[in-house]
Amino acid sequence: MSLGLLLLLLLALGALGFLAGRQRALAAVRGDARDLHSLPGYYGQTVALFATVPALLLCLVWLVVQPAIVERSISALILPEDITAGSSLVLVMSDVRRIAEGMDALAVAGAASEGEIAALVGQPDALKERLAQTGVALAAPILPHIAEAAQVWRAQTALGGQIMAAAVLALAVAGFLLALWRIAPEFRARNVVERFVRVLLVAASSVAILTTIGIIFSLVFESWHFFQLYPARDFFLSLTWAPKFGGGSDLGLWPLLWGTLYVSFIALLVAVPIGLMAAIYLSEYASPAVRAVAKPAIEVLAGIPSIVYGLFALMTVGPFLRDWFAQPLGLGDSSSSVMTAGVVMGIMLIPYVSSLSDDIINAVPQSLRDGSYGLGATQSETIRQVVFPAALPGIVGAILMAASRAIGETMIVVLGAGAAAKLDLNPFEAMTTVTVKIVSQLTGDTEFASPETLVAFALGLTLFVFTLGLNILALYIVRKYREQYE
């Protein structure tokens, strides 16, 4: 049974439970809902919750735990001679997983029956050719024992799915019957539903925290694998980025980090002054009619896809900067440069700064302005000495959001700045960023457990730590200015 069909059955059982619970509650009081402790709908919701929630939780836990158990079972079948020179158990298990997924793709597409797949297990070369049709490209030949392990992987996964479906449905039916049996006029169904809603709200509020923990755990886990294969000293101290799949790579961090900071600095140099001045004009000087037109027009920039900005940088801004600045000044002859990506990214970030800053400035109490005017200050003096300091913490937050957006941007850098990883002060030279290399290292038919692929997680962890430090610094600055204002 597929997961989608299982979820549909659970939803159908929940809907049936709602109707049955409501009907049973009304039948217990001969249709007079005034004799019930709670409204009839609460009794139906109780049955629906008992029928679906425990079963869904079991399904979720099963989907998380089963792959780990299957992988551990299959790894015990791998013989020492299956791990060739230059390989490892992790790489072999990766091949087993990809072969099993390719077999599933053949079966789902109808390209091969189960009998044909079983026959292909004994013909590794033919199996490799058939898997290539599904997009599973393997560099090394398929060993017979590895193909058998992949077939066992498929069998155990299918068996686990069948057991999961049976267990989930059994638990759902048991919850349905138990909740239906408990229904009585004095049963406090409303309290049960409200406790569940409270738990649901707590779980929803914990999603962001758990997601952050999961991201950190995955980055740290895969980065640990990377540093077991590649020296951390070379990663953090080397000034050269030269990945070579197959060995002999030089994976230095600094060229990528320099490109990220350089592009982000130019982008903020463009976005922050323009965005702040636009926000001040809209909130303090513009008439309601002008504001009603100008603010949505500026915010339209935030809705343009980044790939469109990248094409704009490639086709318009890059050639313009090259022809009018780079070549006349003798600084370069390429349209792909840090300046191109920075300028276009700065244009993209203007609405992030202006819109948020405008809302923050408007939130400053009017009494502060009136007090400043009463002391004889002009409008510009009031903005500089009263409104801006009062709104500074929020403005710093808006700038931080723009900085985070700039650090994480990929498409504009790919099309506008190129892919050259190097250390250079010339803003008209092509460079690249951490995010671009994360994408390039994780795409393609490369082995996932190789240093050249796992370096993407080390880059992501480094970027995460860097942005975290930036946020801590900004928080310190905000608190300092807020205390001074208060």
Image (tube, rainbow, N blue to C red):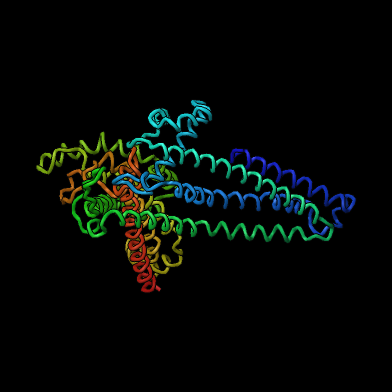
Q: Is residue 380 above or below residue 326?
A: below
Q: Residue placed at 21% from the left, 51% from the top?
A: 255
Picture layout, residue 325 above or below residue 354: above
Position of 428 relative to 196 (above/below): above
Q: Observer-nearest residue: 389 or 136?
A: 136
* Residue 223 visible to the viewer: yes
Q: Can I make out residue 340 in this image?
A: no
The answer to whether residue 23 is left or right of residue 228 is right
Q: Nearer the viewer, residue 422 or 230?
A: 230
- Residue at 28% from the left image edge and 43% from the top image edge: 413
Q: Is residue 464 left or right of residue 256?
A: right
Q: Position of residue 8 (x, y in %)?
A: 64, 40
Instruction: Measuring from the top left, give residue 21's x and y in whole percent.
Output: 78, 49
Compare residues 7 and 320 and report the one nearer the observer.
Answer: 7
Q: Quadrant of the C terminus?
A: bottom left
Residue situated furthest top in the rendering: 111
Q: Quadrant of the N terminus?
A: top right
Q: Position of residue 79 (x, y in %)?
A: 40, 47
Q: Nearer the viewer, residue 424 or 75?
A: 75
